[in-house]
Image (spheres, grey):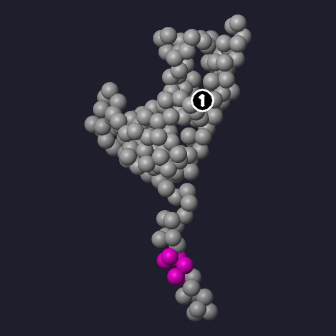
Amino acid sequence: MKAFAAISALLMIAAPAGAQDLPGTTMLKASDPAGVARYLNQLGYRAKLTKDKQGDPKIETGLGGFNAGLYFYGCEKGADCTSFQFQVGIASDTKLSLEQVNNFNKQYRFCQLSLDEERDPWLYYDLPSGTAGISGDAFAQAVDIYEEQLNKLDRLLDETKAAAK
C-alpha cells in the first residue's frame, strides 16, 4: 500500500511537468505577436510581423490563396493586446448583393462578411485571447475554419460572375 501511495505521489508531482510537453498545450496570446507569428510558421504559413497604421502589431500571411492580415486589438501603445482578427479583402469586378452577404453570414458561423465602399468583399474572423491566451489547437482550428470560409466566399464570387454572363 505504501508503494502505491508513493507511486501516486510521484505521478502527481510529475504530471504538471509532463503536461507542458503534451501536444496541443501551446497557449497563444495576443500580447505575444511574435509567438503567434512563430506558431503560424509551424502550421506551414508565412508570417511577417509588422505594424498597422495605429502602431499595433499586424501579421501579414497567406490563407486560402489570399493575402491576409492578422490584426491585434485591445493594445496599449502597441503592446499588451487582448484579441486578434483575421482580415481579407478581395478586390473584384464581381459585386455581391447585400442579400448574398446576409445569406453568407446566416449560413456560415464564426466569420463575418461585409462590403467596402466599392462593394468589394471583406471577410473577418475575431479571436479573443484575453490574458490567459487560447490553445494552439483552437487557433489552428480557427485558421482552418477561416480558410474554408474564404474558399466558400471565392466560390460565391465565381458563381456570381458566371450567373452574370
Residue at mark 1:
150
Residue at 57% from the left image edge and 41% from the top image edge? 142
- Between 127 and 156, the one lying in front of the other is 156
Classed neighbour count for the residue bearing mark 1: other residues with Cα under 10 Å, few (<14), some (14–19), many (≥20)? many
- Quarter residue 143 falls in: top right
Residue at 60% from the left image edge and 88% from the top image edge? 4
Q: Looking at the picture, how far across and down is residue 108, in whole percent?
A: 65, 30
Quadrant in which the C terminus appears: top right
Q: Is residue 133 visible?
A: no
Q: Residue furthest left?
A: 77
Q: Amino acid at mark 1?
A: Leu
Quadrant in which the N terminus appears: bottom right
Look at the image and say whether residue 13 sits in the magenta stretch.
Answer: yes
Please state if 5 lies on the left or on the right of 158 as rendered.
left
Look at the image and say whether residue 140 sits in the magenta stretch.
Answer: no
25 relative to 31, above or below? below
Residue at 44% from the left image edge and 51% from the top image edge? 132
* Mark 1, secondary structure of its residue: helix
Q: Magenta stretch mostly in which secondary structure? A: helix
Q: What residue range appears in magenta?
A: 9-14
Q: Looking at the picture, how far across and down is residue 96, in whole percent?
A: 61, 13
Q: Looking at the picture, how far across and down is residue 122, in whole percent?
A: 53, 22
Q: Looking at the picture, how far across and down is residue 140, in whole percent?
A: 56, 46
Q: Is residue 153 visible?
A: yes
